[in-house]
Image (cartoon, rainbow, N blue to C red):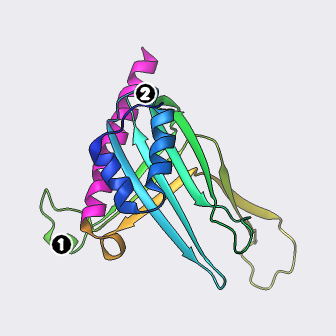
Amino acid sequence: MGMALPEVLVHDLQSAGYYPQLTQGILADSLYEEPVLAHFVHIDTHVDIESIHRHVTAFVLTETRLLLAHVDDDPNAEPGAKPRAVTSSEDIELDRLGTVMVGRTFADPAAYKPGDKPVEVSLTMSWGASKRIEAFPETCGDPNCMGDHGYGGSIFAEDVMLRVSAEAEGQAAVDRMADFAGKLRAAVFHARLRSRR
């Protein structure tokens, strides 16, 4: 039996409304008695012509790691059968997080005052699990040149990219995301300092 989760995390999983007991079980079994310092629960829904697919990710920060618990609809479920869910969990040691990039969008920046809240927050994290390649054909600058100049491109380490907007999810969700992102960056900073000693 796993540990009990903080009440506010349980509340956020219940509010997401997508198999909350299942997600709670995954987290409780993965924490190994480590206390939760911060969390963020993100629900995502994709609609296509034939169906609706749901996905929830719980981001949980502890003193030593970032835990991600995912629950998805099973894409291979038989038509007419009971729904099935696919789960996965991953722990990333804080000093392994290579990138923790936080982007913030502010309304009316000319009137900005310290303490104003962003209306959108994005969080990009990477730890080397996956990379994205963007390639493009090279040119020599001559618009009439028909020569093959090969390809150029960039490799981006981007394991998780999350964006929360007041327009879509509400200002309270943006505030929770900003709080989580701030705590995560501070924890990663301190973990890196400890690893250098």
Q: Secondary structure at mark 1?
A: helix
For the point 45% across and 20% down, which residue is it?
195
In the current view of this chain or complex, which residue is farthest to the right?
A: 147
Asked if residue 190 is among those painted magenta in the image, a careful observer would answer yes
Residue beneath label 1, please? 110
Q: Quadrant of the C terminus?
A: top left
Give residue 27's position: percent from left, percent from top. Answer: 47, 40
Q: Are marks 1 and 2 in contact (CB under 8 Å)?
A: no
Q: Residues within 10 Å of mark 1 (few under 14, many from 20)?
A: few
Q: Is residue 76 left or right of residue 92?
A: right
* Residue 60, image quadrant: top left
Residue type at mark 2: give it. Answer: Thr
Rendered image: mark on residue 189: none
Quick one: 23 or 141, which is closer to the camera?
23
Residue span colored magenta: 172-197
Any magenta on residue 55? no
Identity, as a three-letter code, of the amino acid under mark 1: Ala
Task: Give the quarter of the image for residue 86.
Answer: bottom right
Tell me what residue is drawn at x 13 percent, y 57 percent.
114
Is residue 45 visible to us here? yes
Residue bearing the label numbered 2: 64
Expressed as whole percent of the image width and height from the top left, the position of residue 91 reads 53, 35
Question: In the figure, residue 16 lies in which quadrant?
Answer: bottom left
